[in-house]
Amino acid sequence: MIIEATEDFHLLGTDLKVQAGNHYRAEHASNQPNWEKRKSVFAQVAGGFFLLYEGEYKIIKEDEK
């Protein structure tokens, strides 16, 4: 899926960050507790993945099944 970050985030001690308004490829964070309830996703960023929760992103395009 493609998401758009709604806020800027930076993971302290790393170079991992997402910026509001930018689009990122993402996947459901199915390995996280309560991921369905929290609507957790991993956004693919340069250098790794960034965990985001509902409200921190909006879905631009869902994957086709």
Image (tube, grey):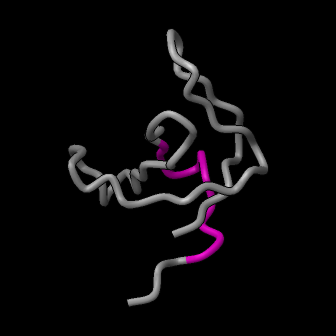
Name the residue located 54 percent from the left edge and 59 percent from the top edge.
25
Q: Report x, y in % for residue 61.
A: 60, 76
Measured along the vertical axis of the image, is residue 17 above or below residue 43?
above
Main SS, magenta region, reads strand
Give the x, y percent position of residue 32: 24, 45
Q: Residue furthest bottom?
A: 65
Whether residue 5 appears in magenta in the rendering, the answer is: no
Horizontal side of residue 34 vs 16, given as left or right: left
Q: Which residues are magenta?
A: 52-61
User: Can you tell which quarter of the image residue 3 is in?
Assistant: bottom right
Number of labelled discs? Answer: 0
- Horizontally, is 7 left or right of 57 in the view? right
Q: Residue at x 41, y 60 (%)?
A: 27
Q: Quadrant of residue 46?
A: top right
- The structure residue drawn at horizontal position 49% and vertical position 43%, both measured from the top left corner, is 52
Q: Taking 50 as reference, is 58 left or right?
A: right
